[in-house]
Image (cartoon, helix red, strand yellow):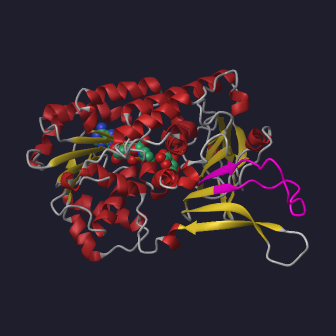
Amino acid sequence: MTDKKAFKPCDLVLFGALGDLSRRKLLISLYRLENANLIEPDTRIIGVDRHEHDNAQFVAIAYKSLQEFLTDELDDAIWQRFSARLAYLQIDLTQAEQYKKLKTVTDSKTRVLVNYFAVSPFLFKSICQGLHQSGILTPESRMVMEKPIGHNLKSSKDINDEVAKVFNEDQVFRIDHYLGKETVLNLLALRFANSIFTTNWNHNTIDHIQITVAEEVGIEGRWEYFDKTGQLRDMVQNHLLQILTFIAMEPPVNLEAESIHNEKIKVLKALRPITVNNVEEKTVRGQYTSGYLKGNAVPGYLEEEGANTESTTESFVALRVDIDNWRWAGVPFYLRTGKRMFGKRTEIVVYFKQLPHNIFKDSFRDLPPNKLIIHLQPNEGVEIEMLNKIPGIDEHIKLKKTKLDLSFSEAFKQSRIFGGYEKLVLEAMRGNPTLFLSRAEIEQAWAWIDSIQDAWRHSNSAPKSYPAGSWGPVASVALVARDGRAWEE
Ligand SMILES: NC(=O)C1=CN([C@@H]2O[C@H](COP(=O)(O)OP(=O)(O)OC[C@H]3O[C@@H](n4cnc5c(N)ncnc54)[C@H](OP(=O)(O)O)[C@@H]3O)[C@@H](O)[C@H]2O)C=CC1
Ligand SMILES: O=C1O[C@H](COP(=O)(O)O)[C@@H](O)[C@H](O)[C@H]1O
C-alpha cells in the first residue's frame, strides 16, 4: 500500500504539542516509530503551543510524557536519537503574524511540511490562515486533522470549507485512529482474501452482526470536551461507523484510497435514518453512576472532576442499525459503546443463520448458529464457533460447541502489532492517503448522526443510568431482546 519513493524527510509540526493527545499518543507513537527505525534520519518534529518554553524544556516535557505513557521500556540510545529531532516554538495560534516563526526552523523547499492539528477544531481556521499567510506552504505540504471534525454536519462543512481554502483535498489527511489498528485493517483481508467468507457474507447466511466497543476508562480529565460531545459523537460518528463500513462494504476494486472511500460512502448512504418516529425502539442512551472496576470504587459521570451535575450527556449508546441495500436487507447491526464498562473489549460478532432442519436433536433441541468472533482489542484474533462430534462409540452422535481459535500474538509471533496512531502518523509522513477519511464520508456520517441527535432532543428523555463496571443500562438488553436476540457476553 505504501509508495516507498514518497518517503521523504519531512518536518512534522505538532500544533498543540503540549496537549493531551500529543503527550499521551503522538509523542509515544513517534518514539515507537523511532525505535522501529521507521523515521527518516532527517525528519524533525517541531512542537508548537502557546506556552513559553525553549527546546530543552520541550525535550524534558516529551521525556516526562514517555515515562508516564510509554508501556514498553525507554531505551537511552533511542531516546538520544529521538530527542535530537525535537524543537519547540511558542505561537499563539490565533495570531497570524506569529506563524512566520516557523520559517526560522523549517525549509519547505527541500522538505515536506506535515502539519498535525492536535488542537480543538475551533483553531483550525486560524491555523490554516496563519500557515497560508506565512508563505511556507507548498503543494507538497500536508495537514492532518483529528476527529471529531466538527460537532454536526454544518460545523463539519464549515471546517472543511475553511481547510479547503488553503489545502487541496489530496493534501488533507483526516485521521480516525481505528483505521490504523491492525485488526481493523485485517477486516479487509478477512473479507476479501478468504473465499469462505466472501461467498457467505450477506443476508442469505448472516442473521445479524454485533459491534461492541466497551471502554474501561471514564472521562480522564476531559470533562469539558466530552460533556459537549457525548459518546455518540465521540465514538459512533467515527470509530463505530468506520468498523461498520469495513464490515458491510462491497469489495473495492483495489486498495487505492478512492476505491475504498467510494465503497464506504455507499454503506453510509444506505443507513436507514433514525428519527423521532423510531428513536425509542432503535436507540438506548446511558450515563454511568458510581461503581466498581476491578475491585476499585470509581465515581459516577456526574461526580467526575469539573462535572456539571445537571448534565444529560450520554456516556453509553446502543443502536439497532439497518442497512437498506441488497446485501444486508433484513440483517440488523447492533452497535454498543460506553465508558466505564465492565472491561475494555472491542469486538465484532457475526451470527450466521440457523440451519433449516435439525438432525441432531439428541444434542441440541435447536442447533446453535455458527459465530465468527473478531477480537479487535485486546487479545487480537479471530474465532469461529462451530459444532463438532464428541469422540466416542455411543449409539447416538453427540455434538459439542467448539472453537477454531486464531490468536494474532500466537500466529504472528515474529511481528510487532503497531498501534493505530503509529501506523497513521507514519502514513501521513509518507504521504499515503489510503487509511484516511474523505470529506464526503465524514459528512455522510454526520448527516446520519445529526438525525439521531435531533430525535433525542425532541424526545426529551434522559439517559438511563448504569453502574460503572457493568455492561450498560438494562434497556440495552431489551433493545436486542425485542428482536429475540442477546448480546454476546
Ligand atoms: N486527547 C485525546 O485522547 C484525543 C483527542 N482528539 C482530538 O485531538 C484534538 C486535541 O485534543 P487534546 O489534546 O485532548 O486537547 P488539549 O486541550 O489537551 O490540547 C490542545 C493544546 O493546544 C493548546 N492551545 C489551545 N489554544 C491555543 C492557542 N491559541 N495557541 C496555541 N496553542 C493553543 C492547549 O493549550 P492550553 O492547555 O493552555 O489550553 C493545549 O496544549 C481535539 O480536536 C480532540 O478532539 C481525538 C482523539 C483522542
Ligand atoms: O477517539 C477516542 O478514542 C478513545 C478510545 O480509543 P482506543 O484506541 O483506546 O479504543 C476514547 O476513549 C476517546 O474518548 C475518543 O475520543
Q: Is residue 210 left or right of residue 53?
A: right
Taking depth in this image into account, of 210 and 75 the one nearest to the observer is 210
Q: Image quarter for residue 292?
A: bottom right
Instruction: State left or right for residue 240 relative to residue 170.
Output: right
The front one of 152 and 181 is 181
The quadrant of the rendering that contains the C terminus is bottom right
In this rendering, position of residue 46 left or right of residue 120: left
Is 357 covered by the magenta stretch? yes
Q: Tell me the residue at 30%/55% (across/down).
A: 426
322 w.r.t. 64: above or below: above
Range drawn in magenta: 347-372
Judging depth in this view, the residue of 69 and 376 nearest the camera is 376
Residue 311 appears in the rendering:
no
Which residue shows up at 57% across the image and 40% down it? 231
Where does residue 281 sit, x and y in percent of width and height? 73, 31
Q: Looking at the image, in which quadrant does ligand 1 appear? A: top left
**Residue 393: image location, x then y, percent:** 86, 78
Does residue 327 appear anywhere in the picture?
yes
Q: In the rendering, at what x and y percent does residue 317 appear?
A: 64, 40
Residue 102 position within the rendered picture, expressed as x and y whole percent measured from the top left: 15, 44
